[in-house]
Amino acid sequence: MLICFDLGGVLVRICRSWPEGCRAAGVPEREHHPRPDHQVRRTELITRYQTGRVECDDFFRELSGIFDGVWSPEEVAKVHHAWILEPYAGTAALIEEIRGAGFPTACLSNTSHSHWGPLLQIPAIAAIGTQHASHLMGLHKPDAAIYRAFENAAGIPGEDIVFFDDLEENITAARAVGWDAIKIDHASETAPQIRAALEQRGVL
């Protein structure tokens, strides 16, 4: 059995909205009136960025444009770099406990090149046995292809993977390919939630 984790919202606390990101970065929260296609364009850009198809500076410039220039590319970059907040309490010790119990660990995260380095410095994430990410694989959750690619890379069938994620669409997609997927509430401490699910499955 392989224990696999999403990162943001599961092992590390992240910003959940643009205003929260502005506050974390110390960037002014200016008034913005989004166009009708704002969210579609923003989601499409983030997907391209998180699958390695857009360079960082181009991403900051394009996202500034989607915000109609209300925030400059430099300010967008500041918000982006402040998006990762802090590890959830107890997650590093829990990862070590899982590994000590003899179970391999991995992660599968939608992220970007600029966030990957800082994420790998977080003790809970550094302790994970195998690290997989969308920008390295060129695939993006909840596309079924990323789960199948992960299985091939890990050499483990889906029915032997326990997966923790905080987004319903990613959980639904993982279950559809046969993974034992558990939804985490990112607004609460996550280590107790993970532990309870693993105890139910006889891992801990």
Image (spheres, rainbow, N blue to C red):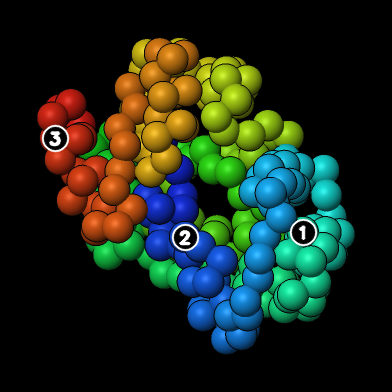
In the picture, which quadrant includes the N terminus?
A: top left
List x then y, in percent, for residue 198. 20, 35
Task: Report how far apart the C-alphas of labels 3 and 1 lie in the structure.
Answer: 45 Å
- Residue labelled with disc 3: 199
The nearer-to-camera label among 3 and 1 is 1
The amino acid type found where label 3 is placed reads Glu
List x then y, in percent, for residue 103. 32, 32
Between 107 and 147, the residue placed more toward the observer is: 147
- Residue labelled with disc 1: 66
Which residue sits at x=27%, y=53%? Answer: 190
User: In the image, is residue 184 above or below residue 81?
Assistant: above
Between 57 and 70, the residue placed more toward the observer is: 70
Disc 3, SS? helix
List x then y, in percent, for residue 55. 84, 55
Does residue 61 appear anywhere in the picture?
yes
Disc 1, SS? helix
Which residue sits at x=73%, y=64%? Answer: 67
Task: Report how far apart the C-alphas of labels 1 and 2 lie in the structure.
Answer: 18 Å
Crowd rating for badge 3 (residues with CA inside 10 Å; few <14, some 14–19, many 20+): few
Between 99 and 115, the residue placed more toward the observer is: 115
Disc 2, SS? loop
Residue 35: image tag:
none
Mark 2 touches mark 3? (CB < 8 Å): no
Mark 1 touches mark 2? (CB < 8 Å): no
- Where, by quadrant of the figure, is residue 64 drawn? bottom right
Residue 16: image tag:
2
Crowd rating for badge 2 (residues with CA inside 10 Å; few <14, some 14–19, many 20+): some
Between 9 and 204, the residue placed more toward the observer is: 9
The amino acid type found where label 1 is placed reads Ile
Is residue 73 toward the left or the right of residue 186 in the image? right
- Where, by quadrant of the figure, is residue 132 drawn? top right
Which residue sits at x=32%, y=62%? Answer: 88
